[in-house]
Image (cartoon, rainbow, N blue to C red):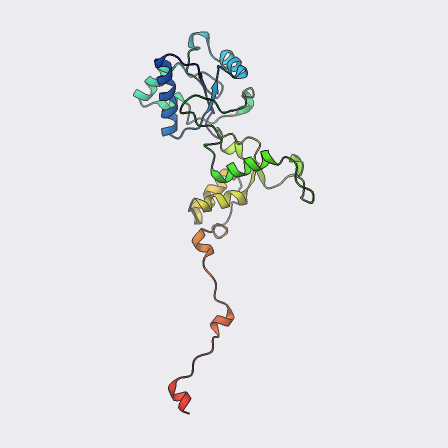
Amino acid sequence: MAPPPIELFLTTIASQHKLRSRQEHLLRTLQVMKIPYTAYDLASDEKAKQRWRRKTPPALQQLPGILVGGVCPGSYEDFENAIEEKSLDVFLRRNEDYDDSYDAPKPAAQAIGVPGVVTPLQMTPERLKTKIMAQRMSPVPPDGMPRDLPANKRTGEFDAGDKFIGYGLQGVKVTDQELIDLVAELGLNGDDAGSLVKDLSGSSDGPKPAEIETKEDTKKVPRTEESKNETKQPTKEETKA
């Protein structure tokens, strides 16, 4: 399991310098610490506004707002205090396991005009991002291509959103082999790579180290029997004889 997802509630209508600087500080802090989040613009997203008001006590309904696992952890001042006291991991519950079955569905993430915001798709690894875009662009396979099996009949796949929470990957199915290719692109191999894939996929067996090759491994060309039995060039003594 993974930590609770973080939702940020911002606004593009920020005429006050204080509000703009707070939004930028909040975004910059999470991005520097590489903590994924989903940002909403309350000026244009009515569903996000309703969720924010429903989940946040009236005394804390001040922007920018934060929800962690569907719960308001405190105000922006509490966020700043957590940074000063070096307890931000506790404030954002980064060491907890989260079960999203207890939370209502979140509004769909969409691009917003707040400076500094990074969308979940932009924070997604390139290999998985390509697959997401392909699924969005081609919902129906071309003629002659096999159609997707029903979800209850698929084997060897798992939902990437369950492993990479906060990156907008919910519903994207990946296989162990795609994870193997991904860690190979990262330059990992051997036992470390096998352990990483095993942890992400939840497989009890996991891929064998030999199954994960780096780009340099693919350049090695094995010697053939023909190359082993090359004809020797005659020496000068053999030529005279």
To which quarter of the image does residue 80 belong?
A: top left
User: How many numbered markers are drawn?
Assistant: 0
Q: Report the side of 184 relative to 153 (left or right).
A: left
Please name whichever residue, 216 or 200, is drawn nearer the observer in this view of the structure.
Answer: 216
- Residue 215: x and y, percent? 45, 52
How far from the left and from the top, in percent, is residue 34? 39, 30
Location of the C terminus (image quadrant): bottom left
Q: Position of residue 235 (x, y in %)?
A: 39, 84
Asked if residue 159 can be seen in this view, the reply is no
Left or right: where does residue 80 sit relative to residue 216? left
Which residue of the protein is positioned furthest toward the bottom in this rendering?
241
Q: Nearer the viewer, residue 181 or 43?
A: 43
Q: Position of residue 29 (x, y in %)?
A: 36, 25
Residue plotted at (64% across, 39% down): 154
The answer to whether one can see residue 203 in this image is yes
108 or 15, which is in the foreground? 15
Image vertical order of residue 215 relative to residue 99, above or below: below
